Image (cartoon, grey):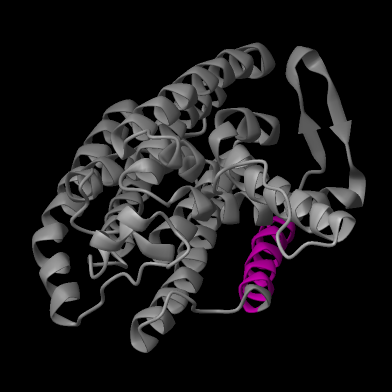
Amino acid sequence: MNEWTNVIAAAASFLTAWLLGFVVIPWLHKLKYGQTILDIGPKWHAKKQGTATMGGIMFITAVAVTFAVGMIIYGFSGADFTGGDRREFVVSLSGAVMAVFFGAVGFLDDFIKVAKKRNEGLTPIQKIILQVMIIAAYFATIYISGFARTVIAFPWGWQWDLGIFYYPIMGLGILYLVNAVNLTDGIDGLCSLVTVVYCAAFAAIAGILGMFGQSLLAFCTAGALIGFLVWNFPPAKVFMGDTGSMFLGGIVCALGVGCKAEFLMVTAGIIYVFEALSVIIQTTVFKITKKIYHTKEGKRVFKMTPIHHHFEMSGWSELKIDVVFSLITVITGALSVFLAFMMFSKQ
């Protein structure tokens, strides 16, 4: 029953996101909510100037509706939300709400950009403050509900109980990944494709754990993103904007933390990790070498960051980057499912 609910929810989510494109994209154009392209980016991105942005509302709407309906069906199928299934309900719903709030921060950032016709919205410190508040509320909800835990599971039976330090450490981890997913959304289709594969991996991991709510969230997100990809595949007719990428960052973290698989969240999301890490490496090396050599320009490790732009500058097409990065995620996602089977199958 639950498996069929997931499949139907994913199909409904796909149709909802796809059909919304016929309404939302013309509406965004009418409002003149077009993307402003940075001058420092690849020069050929200039042709994307004016492409409708904030399209993330298409798949956010699809996920929210289908996930809510799926959980209601789950309840009518015999789940006891006051008993053994209460943790499932609280953790899954809290994760979904966290993602929506991250999407709201992205929406505010996008709205400021389009309203002022520039590529800068909220300041970095404003974003961080809002994101920290959302993360704190997420952990507080789980803690108050009585489902708090402080143990991180690793393969081969090793566990690390961080105690009270779990919250600040995982809070920083969520902060990193949410912004890493945001950085991955730099070329047509990339963030959408990588996250579809990530969600597929976590749908399997949630299945191993017997966590229907988490599996449903993964299925709904994957289905909605495939529907969105009809419009976002290169050449994109609409961009997800920070509205969509920050929501997806929340989903990525909600699935990893909610499934008690923080380690696997990193392995399955290795593309996100390296996207953000490339920026950190580039910035650090640039500043250090600039100071050492007393020059106006420091040394660069990559031609441009995030790292997908390095490959773009090396002559790779957007489609090739999408395919290669997605295949890497397929490999790391499959590895993560295998590790999950080793870690959780005996529970």
Q: Is residue 81 visible?
A: no
Task: Decide if residue 255 is on the left or right side of residue 191.
Answer: right
Residue 199 seen by the camera: yes
Name the side, left or right, on which 292 lies relative to 206: right
Q: How many marks?
A: 0
Of 267 and 171, which appears nearest the observer? 267
Q: Residue 26: say if magenta.
A: no
27 vs 300: above or below: below
The one of 58 and 231 positioned closer to us in this rendering: 231
Between 220 and 241, the one lying in front of the other is 241
What kind of secondary structure does the magenta stretch mostly adopt?
A: helix
Instruction: Judge whether 130 appears above or below 6 on screen.
Output: below
Q: Is residue 139 magenta?
A: yes
- Please report the residue visible at 89 percent of the width from the left and 50 percent of the height from the top: 165
Location of the C terminus by quadrant is top right
Would residue 328 be found to the left or right of residue 162 on screen?
left
Q: Position of residue 72 (x, y in %)?
A: 34, 51
Percent coordinates x, y for residue 269 in the rendering: 56, 35
Q: Quadrant of the N terminus?
A: top left
Q: Residue 132's quadrant in the figure? A: bottom right
For the point 52% across and 53% down, the residue is 183
Residue 301 rendering spot, x and y as whole percentages: 67, 41
- Residue range (magenta): 126-145
Residue 118, image x and y in percent? 41, 80
Who's the residue at 85% across and 62% down the image?
294
